[in-house]
Amino acid sequence: MDNRFRVPKNQSLVKLAKELRKNMTPEEKKLWYQYLRTYPIKFYRQKVIGHYICDFYCPTIRLVIELDGKQHYNEEDAAYDRERTAFLESYHITVIRYYDGLVRKQFGEVCEDIDRIVKELIWKRSK
C-alpha cells in the first residue's frame, strides 16, 4: 500500500473503542449483526483512525460508515463531523453517514445503499 495514505492510529483510544464495541447502540448492533458482520468484504467495528473512532471501517476499499443520532444535528456537532470527514478524506477514505432512524425504519434500503457504494468503490479502486 502507498505509505502516503497509511492511516494513523491513536493508541490511547483503543481501550475506549473496545468499550464502544461492547456497548453499541441498537442501530449499530442491527447493522453489524444483521448485515456487515457477514458481508463478503471485511468490516471492523469501532475502528480507531487517527484521533477518531469510526463506527464501521472497511480497509480493503477505505470506507467508513457512520450512524448518526439526533446529537449530530446541532451546529457544533455538525462542525465536528465535517472536520472528522475532512480528516478521513485526506487519507482517501470515503465516509458515508446514515441517520440512525433510517436504520430502524428502512433497514433494507440502507443495506442496499451500502452494497451499491461498496461495489462502486471496488470498481473505482480496480482501475
Image: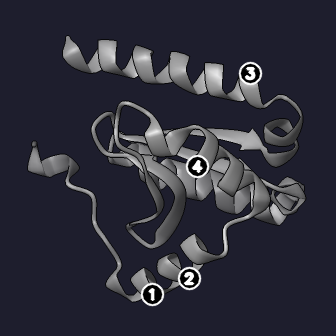
| Residue at mark 2 to residue at mark 1: CA–CA distance | 6 Å
Choose mark 2 or mark 4, whichever is in front: 4
How far from the left and from the top, in percent, is residue 4? 15, 49
Q: Residue at x 28, y 66 (%)?
A: 8
Specify the quadrant of the image occupied by residue 121. Answer: top left
Amino acid at the residue labelled 3: Glu
> Considering the numbered disc 1 on the image, is that residue within a helix, a strand or a loop?
helix
| Residue at mark 1 to residue at mark 3: CA–CA distance | 33 Å
Crowd around label 4: few <14 · some 14–19 · many ≥20 (10 Å):
some
Q: Residue at x 67, y 56 (%)?
A: 29
Q: Earlier in the sequence, mark 1 or mark 3?
A: 1
Q: Are marks 3 and 2 in contact (CB under 8 Å)?
A: no
Q: Residue at x 32, y 20 (%)?
A: 122
| Residue at mark 4 to residue at mark 3: CA–CA distance | 15 Å
| Label 3 sits on residue | 109
Q: Nearer the viewer, residue 8 or 38?
A: 38
Amino acid at the residue labelled 2: Glu
> Considering the numbered disc 3 on the image, is that residue within a helix, a strand or a loop?
helix
Q: Earlier in the sequence, mark 3 or mark 2?
A: 2
Amino acid at the residue labelled 4: Trp
Q: Residue at x 77, y 31 (%)?
A: 107
| Label 1 sits on residue | 15
Amino acid at the residue labelled 1: Lys
Q: Earlier in the sequence, mark 2 or mark 4?
A: 2
Image quarter (top left, top right, bottom left or bottom right) of the C terminus = top left
Q: Which mark is residue 19?
A: 2
15 to 127, vertically: above or below: below
Q: Earlier in the sequence, mark 1 or mark 4?
A: 1
94 to 53, vertically: above or below: above
| Label 4 sits on residue | 32
